[in-house]
Amino acid sequence: MAKFAANLTMLFTEVPFLERFERAHNAGFKAVEYLFPYAFDVDILADKLQRYGFEQALFNMPPGDWDTGERGFAAIPGRELEFQESVKTALTYAKALNCKKVHAMSGIVDPRFTREQHTTTFINNIRFAADAFAEQDIELMIEPLNTRDAPNYFIAHQRQAADLIRQVERANVKLQLDLYHAQIMDGDLTHLINDLADVTGYIQIASIPSRNEPFEGEINYPHLFTVLDDSGYDGWIGCEYNPKNTTEEGLDWVKPYL
């Protein structure tokens, strides 16, 4: 049975971030995710989780300078020490929030380096992070991003990510399969879900092409929820979409699952 986590970066934006926990609770969600926790004191976030009975399903490692277009740096040569420091920061938050899945963003390709150099850097960095997270029983997520929203991102295709995960050779490194990105870049989602079930650790959803509520557009999500059940996936499904109007006005699709 599909179960859903509210993405507080994208949902309930009618109110300031710290007020979104209450909105998600009132809507019936039992888990939350968001892009980054680092602008807030970890004790404040932990209190919000405890107050509303939430599980912290996922967040991202520090991404670099997000406002100037950086999208992580796990694959960027020359930034290995910065990556190692970001692992420490993410671990501090993950432990305090009891978050068992953390996403490491790989970054926008640096044209000064070859693809092979990016790949070597990525594998070494992910091994370092995976080993650190394994000590706390935390899984490290790898997510491809589509080239329309994130041009020149290091990983764009789902099977490409799965191949890198297998090269990393760490049991706690998993695929963050965002079906919005996957449909844009790969399609054939039923077979994709089944083929990659052994490496999948987290699912996210949104409609195509508008990235709004997942009850419209070209993806038949009720069918895919059944496919996910049949594949053995029993984790949270992150609602990472932009509501068309207010968040609450667009939640009828999820109420039967909550």
Image: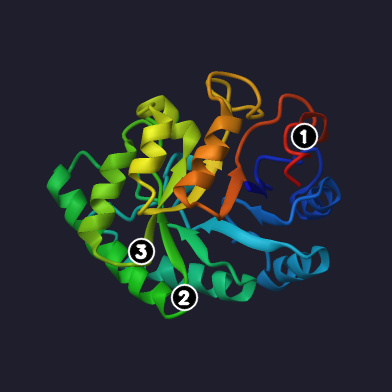
Looking at the image, tell me whether mark 3 or mark 1 is earlier in sequence order: 3
Of marks 3 and 2, the one in the foreground: 2
Question: Most extreme residue toward the front, as rendered?
Answer: 230
Looking at the image, tell me whether mark 3 or mark 2 is earlier in sequence order: 3
Question: Disc 2 on helix, strand or loop?
Answer: loop
Say above or below: 166 vs 181.
below
The front one of 112 and 115 is: 115
Residue on which the image places disc 1 = 251
The x, y position of residue 212, in whole percent, is 64, 27
Give the amino acid type for the residue marked by disc 1 in the picture.
Leu
Residue 109 can be seen, yes or no: no
The front one of 67 and 161 is: 161
Q: Write down the quadrant of residue 125 in the picture.
A: bottom left
Q: Write down the quadrant of residue 211 in the picture.
A: top right
Residue on which the image places disc 3 = 83
Residue on which the image places disc 2 = 137
Looking at the image, tell me whether mark 2 or mark 1 is earlier in sequence order: 2
Tell me the distance, in whole angstroms, between the alpha carbons under discs 3 and 1.
37 Å
